[in-house]
Image (cartoon, rainbow, N blue to C red):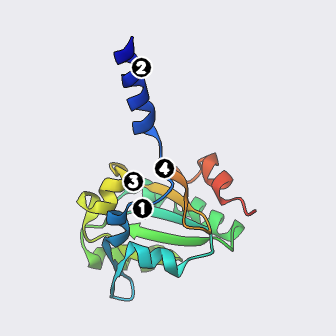
Amino acid sequence: MKQLRIVFLFLIIGCQSPNRFSKEALNEKFFSSAQKDVTFQNILLKHQGKKILIDIWASWCRDCVVTLPELKKLQQENPTVHFVFLSLDKSKERWMKAIYRLKIKGDHYYMAEGKKGAFGKFLRLWWIPRYMVVDEFGEITLFKATKITDKNILKALKIK
């Protein structure tokens, strides 16, 4: 019986979503659309005091591209929310072309380390699109959504 309780406790703890980014994830470098390396910590600092919707995507991801109209609608309905796009494209060139071709407005970064970097490992990233919401204080209020229509996104974006 004691072993069963330990397993149950482990499952509960292991399934909990963090509300803060790990030090390693914060220190990972991304490549900005302005052609500069920047840490994830600096990305968050740029948007400090604002709600942030993070969209992890790639131009080769059909689900990511097909749902862009719904994402753009969400942007229009939530003008005070900052949208940060983190790309897992296979090259910086494809990523930059996709931003312009698809007319995606927001703050854009290329995940140079991809899913295998500290940021990807922190997220336990295995599927895209992946959406997260970070509040005005830098806390993760929504750790994982895989559909832009997820009702938890709207709850997390609700302006207080």
Mark 2 vs mark 4, CA separation in Å: 27 Å
Question: Considering the image in quadrants, where does the N terminus appear?
Answer: top left
Mark 2 = which residue? 5
Label 1 sits on residue = 56
Amino acid on which the number 3 mark rests in the picture: Ile
For disc 4, the neighbor class at 10 Å (few under 14, some 14 to 19, many from 20) is: some
Residue 144 numbered tag:
4
The tag earlier along the polypeptide, 2 or 4, is 2
- Please tell me which of labels 2 and 1 falls first in the chain: 2
Residue 118 percent location from the top left of the image? 29, 61
Look at the numbered discs 3 and 1 and tell me whether their residues touch, using CB distance below 8 Å.
Answer: yes
Distance from Cα at disc 1 to Cα at disc 4? 11 Å
Q: Nearer the viewer, mark 2 or mark 4?
A: 2
For residue 112, above or below residue 71: below
Would you identify the image quadrant in which residue 43 lies? Answer: bottom left
Dot 3 corresponds to which residue? 128
Tell me whether the residue at label 2 lies in contact with that at label 1, contact meaning CB atoms closer than 8 angstroms.
no
